[in-house]
Amino acid sequence: MSVDALFRPFQVKSLKMPNRIVMAPMTRSFSPGGVPTSDVAGYYRRRAEGGVGLIITEGTVVERPAARNDPKVPVFHGEALPEWKKVVDEVHAAGGLIAPQLWHVGSARGRVRTGPRSARSTAPRASPPPANASWSPMTDEDIADTIAAFGRSARATRELGFDAVEIHGAHGYLIDQFFWSALNDRDDRWGGGTIADRARFGAEVVRAVREGVGPDMALILRLSQWKSQDFTVKNAHDPAELEQWLTPLIEAGVDVFHCSQRRFWEPEFEGSDLNFAGWTKKITGLPTITVGSVGLDGEFIAAFGGAGSKPASLDGLIKRLEADEFDLVAVGRALLADPHWVEKIRDGRLDELKDFERSAMMTLS
């Protein structure tokens, strides 16, 4: 099958991509003290040289005491910002485009202590934690300060010359915890019985980021139904609930939805072959990014247990792209293992595609 659909240009606001391929954000934990190194800059530069249309960085956390779960996860404030400028400059010098992913892990941080020793993880819950819990319910002040922190990082995104910005609202981390009825039992304006009610925190974060980056920069929001804590859970059980969830986020300023699945080919709702990105585009009319085991025969959760994956056909993906079910395709492990993956796909050098092995996660190749 022709791969031409993957190599059509795409534009949203000031973001002008030469093709439809996005490098998915993947936590790498190679930034000691939260500060990206020259090796990190080189890692992203090589993907730009290899022809990726847009690089989305690994999750990089906002300025809150308990925002990250690993001391080598990069931050997006303070002394890290000049180093992020070096990353941007290297990617641009290679002809690439790059967006940071802004992140707060919330109670998924667990008992890891990466901030001040007294800092506890925060959660959207209203109910008091058990005696041995490692988290505390977020107060109104906590919520306001967190929203403001996203806004500050967004302003830095614009000042440093990034080409777009992504907010991490997926996978059971803080913003997704507010969406999730199992964790958000608040009875104030940040909770409620419907997904639209529980979307208010996410919408306020989007609004703060939109104000920070200005009207012309593309704002991407990554969402998922599945959580790291539960692979089967759904925030939206049918298209009507999905519309209720997405509408306040669109009104707040989202331009593109990045729709995370473990396997992109799986239908989101019964009675339709559309995946999560397909349904999101159908309901909103906005551009969407599909992601989930693209280009490989094994899904990524298994990789953490040591499972490898081999290259897989892109025919099904390209058929969906040609049918305009979604607009962009995010590639994770295949690009992690091989910075030249895009060039090989474009040039038909399929025999040169590399297997993915867990060892690829242990280095910045």
Image (cartoon, grey):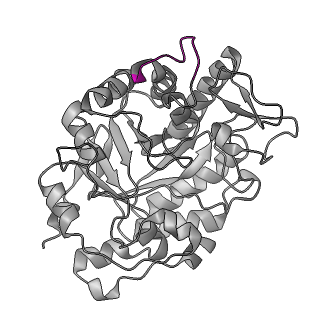
Q: Residue at x 24, y 40 (%)?
A: 279
Q: Position of residue 276 (x, y in %)?
A: 30, 45
Q: Observer-nearest residue: 50 or 180?
A: 180
Using residue 266 as the reference point, say whether residue 355 is left or right of it.
right
Q: So how many labels did they put on this image?
A: 0
For residue 170, above or below residue 361: above
- Magenta stretch: includes residue 189: yes
Q: Which residues are magenta?
A: 185-195
Report the residue that reaches farthest toward the right: 117
For residue 277, above or below residue 340: above
Figure quadrant of the N terminus: bottom left
- Magenta stretch: includes residue 246: no
Using residue 71 as the reference point, say whether residue 158 is left or right of it.
left
Q: Position of residue 99 (x, y in %)?
A: 46, 48
Residue 361, picture quadrant: bottom right
Q: Residue at x 40, y 59 (%)?
A: 96
Report the residue that reaches farthest toward the top: 188
Q: Position of residue 91 (x, y in %)?
A: 48, 60
Report the residue that reaches farthest toward the bottom: 351
Q: Observer-nearest residue: 251 or 261?
A: 261
Figure quadrant of the C terminus: bottom right
Q: Residue at x 72, y 40 (%)?
A: 78
Residue 62, picture quadrant: top right
Q: Residue at x 26, y 50 (%)?
A: 267
Q: Main secondary structure of the magenta part?
A: loop
Q: Observer-nearest residue: 32 or 289?
A: 289
Asked whether residue 363 appears in the rendered view, the answer is: no
Using residue 8 as the reference point, say whether residue 117 is left or right of it.
right
Asked whether residue 180 appears in the rendered view, the answer is: yes
